[in-house]
Image (spheres, rainbow, N blue to C red):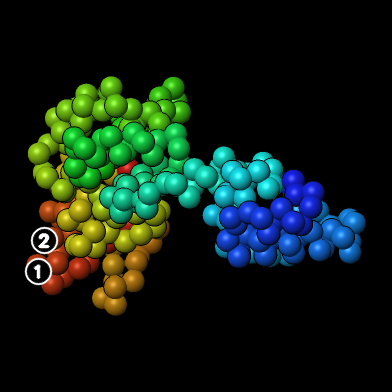
Amino acid sequence: MKILIKDPKELIDSDLTPEQIGLCTIVLLLKENCSKMTLAKFKTKVKIKDYTKALIDLHEKGFIKWSGYELAKSRVGRKKIDPKIIDIVQFMNSVFGQRRKPDTKTFYSKLVTLLKSYTVEDIKTVIQHRHKVWANDKKMKQHLVAETVFGIRKFDKYLVLAQKDLGSFGSKTVVELSLKKGDIIDYNIAQNLLPNTTYLVKGYRLDEDGNTIGNGVEERKNGKVILRLVKAMAQSGRVNYQYQYIETI
């Protein structure tokens, strides 16, 4: 960022706001009294984010030259993020184990377009199914990224395959929970497991106080089987067995 003002009178004769004039005046005074003061150092002294719009305007009017102008302009001009997009990206992060941001340029526009034709549940279903199909495939695992999964041309195909594979269970085609290794699968969680998806779990016998006995046994069971077994125990009031989540297969 460089200040392009040669004469302070330029500020008086301009149509700048008091805030913008103040910013420029402070920098000019600091540079006069401290020759080593740069705008980079000045930015560390003030909350520059509070003056982003003012700095954008100063750049556009030729009073400063700001290398961060393009990025700042795009961020300020971007509309408030749709809560649906935030919801989708948070879900994707929990399934893929990533930390993507909702306003990421490389896929933000794709989600905006998808939401014109598909529901949030449709998109979540595709996310869940692509993870199921690709997560254990060494070659395809690299494609578990938003840029690929939200691709406009193939999305309809992905959705058809997901619905065919997972079945027509409405919102229950998507696990609304972020399961972690070791989490106990109680009745509430079991109701949200994908019926036809296989889960690797560890089963434990429980003593009278509800404590686990032994080291447990690893088992592979699909969601509907786990739900049936957990539901039966919940209804009988005799919870003598416990399943702990390991991973989705």
Look at 38% across and 39% down and name the residue there: 108
Return the residue found at the far front. 13
Q: Residue 168 is drawn in which quadrant? A: top left
Give the image quarter of residue 107. top left
Residue 115 horizontal/vertical position (percent): 24, 40
Tell which of 39 and 10 is nearer to you. 10
Residue 23 shows in the view: yes
Let me know if residue 122 appears in the view.
Answer: no
Give the number of callouts: 2
Residue 53 rendering spot, x and y as whole percentages: 54, 54
Q: In this view, does 162 lie above or below 40?
A: above
Q: Could you tell me the amino acid type at mark 2?
A: Ala
Q: Residue at x 60, y 64 (%)?
A: 19
The percent position of residue 176, horizontal first and vertical second, equals: 26, 53
Residue type at tag 1:
Ser
Q: Where is residue 100 in the image (x, y as percent from the top left)?
A: 46, 45
- Quickly name the residue at label 2: 232
Query: How far apart are the two marked residues, 2 and 1, measured between alpha carbons?
Result: 6 Å
53 to the left or right of 103: right
* x 26%, y 76%: residue: 208
Pick the front one: 183 or 221: 183
Q: Residue at the location (59% across, 43% down)? A: 60
- Helix, strand or loop for disc 2: helix
Tags 2 and 1 in contact by the CB under 8 Å rule? yes
Q: Mark 2 Cα within 10 Å, few/some/many (few <14, many 20+)?
A: some
Q: In which quarter of the image is residue 211?
A: bottom left
**Would you name the residue on which mark 1 appears?**
236
Label 1 environment density (alpha carbons within 10 Å; few <14, some 14–19, many ≥20): few
